Every structure is written in structure tokens, then in C-alpha cells.
Amino acid sequence: MLEYNKQNIAIFGYSGHAYVVIDALLENNMAIGGYFEQKEANINPYNLNYLGIEDEKTLKLLDQNSLVFPGIGSNSVRRKIIELFEKNNCNQFVLQHPKSIVSKSAKIEMSTLISAGAIINSFSKIGKGCIINTGAIIEHECKIDDYSHIAPGAVLAGNVKIGSESFIGANSVVKQGITIGNNVTIGAGSVVLKNVPNNETWVGNPAKRIK
């Protein structure tokens, strides 16, 4: 398991997926300083401080030692937030839930979430800003590009390649050696037996393209 500096964390986004991120932070005994959002949340289940809107001006108000993490489920929006982090030299990190399993030979880039029950096996590579969601299994030598989301219970067999900003739906299965392109959506429960080109949506068992 990864070890963290217990600095204050600023969360970007505060609903839905952000709650999963916050739980993972709390399980790692990390201090949460507050959240950035377009407006202050009406519902505040964790009693967090509102830090301001998600822009460069308010980001500069953070202490230089603060850490930042995206709590946003949308791949495209999460990409924009991480680009903002990079532009402002923010302190990013990988968030691994303590009840996940990650091989020591796996490589994971910044602002990626590894949720509870997820397993990432030998020599897999996970890009920046990815979500490996609850109970997902990433087998040996898989490669997942930046800003993609592997949904709860999805299984990638060995040597699978996933392009950037793609979504692999809950409880779907991707056969060993398959390549899935950029900006692809695989529907929940699908079984992918063929390579999938960029910018397509596939569903079913076996999965087929939706026009």
C-alpha cells in the first residue's frame, strides 16, 4: 500500500464520485482541508469547508504544501481539472484505498484513484487521472491511458490496452489481448471479444457496436 504525507487535501468536486474519494482519504487517515466546486454545496455530509470555484484564481489561495485530488466522475471534466493542476504546479498524488491490492511492479500515474476491492496485477500501467473503481480487476500487463474509468466489477484480462478518456462499464469483461481505443464507451455487463476503434460505443455479449 502507498504511504502518504498527512497534509491537507483539497478536493475538486463534491457529490457522487467525490464521496468515494473522500472515504478513501479518510481510510488513509488523511486530513481534508475542503472542496472546490462551482458553487457551495447544499448538502455537506462530511462537513467540509467550501474553498471556492474551480479556477486558477482560487487555486492560488491554497497553501504551497497542500495536496489536490479530483473528485469528478466525468472523464472530460476530470481531464480539464488535472490540466489546471499541472498548469499551476499543484501537488498531486495517487490515491489507493487500503482495501485494494496493487502489484509492486505496477506503475500508476498522478491523480488516479484505486478504489476499495480493486486489484491491479503485475506490470500493469495506469495513466494519470484514471478511476479504477470498486472491485475492478486489472490483470497482468494491461495498459490504461490517461483519464479513463474502469467501472465497478469490470475485469480486464491480461495484456488489454485501453485508450484515453474511455469508459468500461460495470461488470463488463474484456478478453485478453484486446485493444480498446480512445473515447470509447463499453456498456455495463458487456463481454468484449474484438478490438474496438476510437469514439465508438459497444454493448452486449458478445459486445457489438451501437450505431
Image: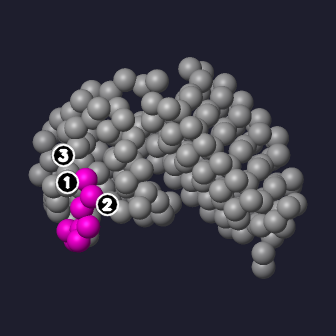
| Secondary structure character of the magenta stretch overall | loop
Q: Residue 136: x and y, percent? A: 63, 44
- N-terminal of the two: label 3 or label 1? 3
Residue at 52 percent across and 52 percent down: it is 147
Of all residues shown, which one is farthest toward the front? 45
Residue type (three-letter) at the residue carrying disc 3 = Gly
Q: In the image, 13: left or right of 165?
A: left
Residue type (three-letter) at the residue carrying disc 1 = Leu
Numbered-mark total = 3
Q: In the image, 26: left or right of 129?
A: left
Q: Secondary structure at mark 2?
A: loop
Mark 2 lies on residue? 14
Q: In the image, 187: left or right of 17?
A: right
Q: In the image, 132: left or right of 89?
A: right
Q: Secondary structure at mark 1?
A: loop
* Residue count near mark 3 (Cα–Cα under 10 Å), binned few <14, some 14–19, many ≥20: some
Q: Residue 204: x and y, percent? A: 81, 65
CA–CA distance in space, label 1 to label 2: 9 Å
Residue 48 shows which numbered tag? Answer: 1
**Residue mark closest to the camera, 3 vs 1:** 1
Is residue 152 shown above or below 30?
A: below
- N-terminal of the two: label 3 or label 2? 2
Magenta region, residue range: 39-46
Image quadrant occupied by the C terminus: bottom right
Residue at 37 percent across and 23 percent down: it is 3
Mark 3 lies on residue? 33
CA–CA distance in space, label 3 to label 1: 7 Å
Q: Is residue 198 magenta?
A: no
Q: Residue 105: x and y, percent? A: 60, 21
Is label 1 in contact with label 2 (beta carbons under 8 Å)? yes
Residue at 37 percent across and 54 percent down: it is 19
- N-terminal of the two: label 1 or label 2? 2
